[in-house]
């Protein structure tokens, strides 16, 4: 089967509106959390989120694109523009049928849905809906509009597996290129979930942090005092390309994707399996596909969202795969800085994993002061500050409501 490499990346995150800015701030341990500004959250239990800073759609997209798209699609278009420029692909000479789009989102056009339903509730005697309501709302529209904007006519669809969504998309892109169904695939994920309905819904499940007086330290994965995740928004794009195709055109290659796998917990609609059984199997399958032993992986970007149950179950799965005293492994949770982007999380965390390979630096887990007593001290979590480390192989975990587990493994090119 074909080898698959990453030749371009783009990012729009709460701690940076480009890959370079995102990476710089992640290495610096910068928090993207603050009091919510997108709506009045005064009467909500949760008042904090990791919002984008300084992103103005009108500066980057035309009027028609903005009019016809929800924010999650606008975020996708922005990040993809950066990634395609970064890749150096000349779309005028490559067959458009050789380039596909496999995108991910967990919620799709939540803000669009919320706004239209509110308007309808106030105008029931004369019901009117925006003619772009459905196109803006549906989850597949980001992949559709990416293909329209850039003229990409290959494989095109959207994955939805809650917070495992981006890794599901990356895995599918990886497999289609390996099977020679495409030369290049634009993949990743985006989310715009900082809305009243979304924040309210997750808060009612007691999934989100209510440490409103200290937003920047509220996301504290693995800490004994963690109380839930902090919502984030944005997008991440990766350009996956068949190795020989990339080599022939002299592309810069960031890393190779060598394994990916998915499993289901078959346990609960929102909680992860307490023993991490599904996550364990997914990591084992990804390693097997990559023809790697656990000791070959030396960086793990954890899903770790800062929830009491989820963090512990992930640690159990890591111990199941890597042992109680991993010799070569370093672990960090970058959600401590970005918050949780739901369907976009795996994409931006894949970017950080790949940048760690490129730069030889592991970004930290910030805010964690006292490790949960159920986590052995031998588990090598990178805390507070980034470390210099020769990352040869990085594994990225993502887990989603419904019991979805999706894993991707990236490796330094030989």
Image: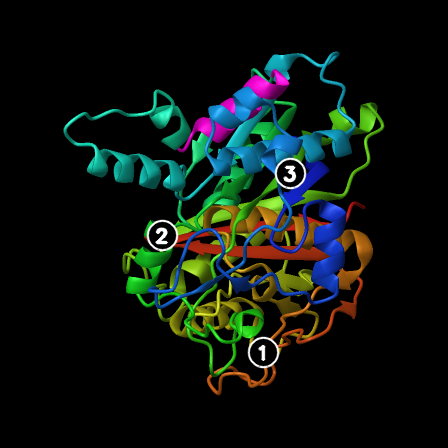
The mark closer to the camera, 2 or 1, is 2
Q: Residue 340 placed where, x, y %? A: 50, 57
Residue at x 79% of width, y 51% of height:
358
The range drawn in magenta is 138-151
Q: How many numbered circles does the render carry?
A: 3
Crowding at label 3, few (<14), some or many (≥20) Cα neighbours within 10 Å? many
- First in sequence: mark 2 vs mark 3: 2
**Picture residue at 35% right of the left edge, 68% below the top:** 45
Q: Tell me residue 391's x, y (percent).
A: 75, 60
At a point 18% along the width and 25% down the height, the residue shown is 126
- Comparing 229 with 194, the one in front is 194
Name the residue tied to disc 1: 368
Task: Tell me the residue that label 2 is attached to.
Answer: 196
Q: Is residue 65 left or right of residue 253?
A: left
Secondary structure type for disc 1: loop
Q: Nearer the viewer, mark 3 or mark 1?
A: 1
Residue 166 can be seen, yes or no: yes
Identify which residue, 308 or 274, lies in the foreground.
Answer: 308
Q: Within the magenta stretch, is there residue 393?
A: no
Q: Which badge, 3 or 1, comes first in the chain's sequence?
A: 3
Residue 67 image offset from top left, x and y in percent: 48, 25
Q: Does residue 392 appear in this view?
A: no
Which residue has dot 3 on it?
238
Helix or strand or loop: what does disc 3 sit on? strand
**For mark 2, does the 10 Å Cα neighbourhood hold few (<14), some (14 to 19), or many (20 or more) residues?**
some
Residue 145 - label = none
- Secondary structure category for the residue under label 2: helix
């Amino acid at each position: 089967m074909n080898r698959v490499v990453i030749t371009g990346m783009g990012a729009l995150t709460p701690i940076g509106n480009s890959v370079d800015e995102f990476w710089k701030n992640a290495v610096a341990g910068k928090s993207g959390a603050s009091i919510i500004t997108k709506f009045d959250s005064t009467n909500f239990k949760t008042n904090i989120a990791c919002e984008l800073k300084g992103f103005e759609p009108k500066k980057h997209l035309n009027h028609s694109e903005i009019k016809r798209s929800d924010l999650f699609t606008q975020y996708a278009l922005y990040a993809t523009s950066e990634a395609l420029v970064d890749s150096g692909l000349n779309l005028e000479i490559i067959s458009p049928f050789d380039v596909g789009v496999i995108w991910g989102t967990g919620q799709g056009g939540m803000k669009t849905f919320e706004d239209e339903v509110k308007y309808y509730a106030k105008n029931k005697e004369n019901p009117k809906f925006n003619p772009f309501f459905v196109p803006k709302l549906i989850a597949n529209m980001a992949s559709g509009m990416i293909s329209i904007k850039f003229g990409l006519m290959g494989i095109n669809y959207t994955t939805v597996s809650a917070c495992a969504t981006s890794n599901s998309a990356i895995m599918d892109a990886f497999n289609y290129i390996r099977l020679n169904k495409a030369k290049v695939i634009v993949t990743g994920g985006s989310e715009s979930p900082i809305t009243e309905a979304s924040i309210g819904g997750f808060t009612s499940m007691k999934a989100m942090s209510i440490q409103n007086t200290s937003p920047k330290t509220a996301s504290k994965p693995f800490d004994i005092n963690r109380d839930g995740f902090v919502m984030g928004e944005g997008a991440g794009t990766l350009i996956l390309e068949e190795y020989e195709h990339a080599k022939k055109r002299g592309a810069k290659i960031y890393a190779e994707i060598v394994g990916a796998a998915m499993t289901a917990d078959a346990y609960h609609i929102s909680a992860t399996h307490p023993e991490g059984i599904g996550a364990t199997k997914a990591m084992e399958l990804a390693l097997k596909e990559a023809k790697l032993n656990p000791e070959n992986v030396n960086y793990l970007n954890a899903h770790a969202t800062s929830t009491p149950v989820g963090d512990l179950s992930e640690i159990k799965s890591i111990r199941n795969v890597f042992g109680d005293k991993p010799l070569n492994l370093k672990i960090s949770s970058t959600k401590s800085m970005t918050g949780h982007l739901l369907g976009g999380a795996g994409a931006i965390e894949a970017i950080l994993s790949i940048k760690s390979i490129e730069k030889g630096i592991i970004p930290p887990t910030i805010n964690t002061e006292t490790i949960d007593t159920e986590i052995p001290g031998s588990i090598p979590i990178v805390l507070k500050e980034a470390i210099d480390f020769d990352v040869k192989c990085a594994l990225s975990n993502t887990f989603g409501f419904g019991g979805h587990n999706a894993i991707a493994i990236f490796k330094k090119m030989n």
